Amino acid sequence: MYREEEGNPENDKTAIKWYTLAAKQGNWVAQSSLAEMYEAGEGVLKDDVKAYMWYNLAASSGRGMTRYSKGLLAEKMT
């Protein structure tokens, strides 16, 4: 919802806040969204390690696309 207006710093900060709350409760969509935002540096400083962490948590729910994104990021990191 908040990320729909991409590039708007206020929306990105609000999205980070709510995604973090949901992600810490195990919501895989929020975990994946946080990973994307950390990977792109949207609303937060770009951080591939945190992005990988959130992708890894989201992938543990068995979501194929998240596992794929995690793998792509891992290739960039090594």
Image (spheres, helix red, strand yellow):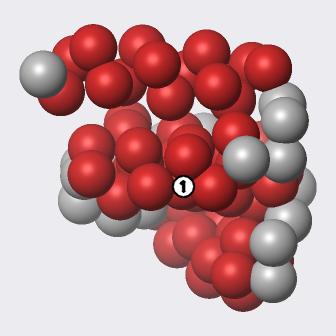
Label tally:
1
Residue 24: name its quadrant.
Answer: bottom right
- Residue that numbered label 1 is attached to: 54
x then y, percent, for residue 50: 35, 58
The reply to whether residue 37 is in sight is no
- In what element is the residue under mark 1? helix
Figure quadrant of the N terminus: bottom right
Q: Amino acid at mark 1?
A: Trp
Q: Which residue is depicted at the point 69% across and 29% down?
A: 66
Relative placement, left or right, of 75 versus 71 is: left
Relative placement, left or right, of 34 versus 63 is: left
The reply to whether residue 53 is in sight is yes
Residue 6: name its quadrant.
Answer: top right
x then y, percent, for residue 34: 58, 56
Of the pair 14 and 53, the residue shown nearer to us: 53
Relative placement, left or right, of 24 versus 12 is: right
Of the pair 7 and 53, the residue shown nearer to us: 53
Image vertical order of residue 76 relative to residue 35, above or below: above
Image vertical order of residue 78 relative to residue 46, above or below: above
x then y, percent, for residue 53: 44, 55
Label 1: how many residues lie within 10 Å, few (<14), some (14-19) or many (20+)? many
Q: Which residue is depicted at the point 76% across and 59% down?
A: 30
Q: Which residue is depicted at the point 63% across and 77% down?
A: 20
Of the pair 3 and 60, the residue shown nearer to us: 60
Figure quadrant of the C terminus: top left
Image vertical order of residue 71 relative to residue 18, above or below: above
x then y, percent, for residue 29: 83, 50
Relative placement, left or right, of 21 versus 55 is: right
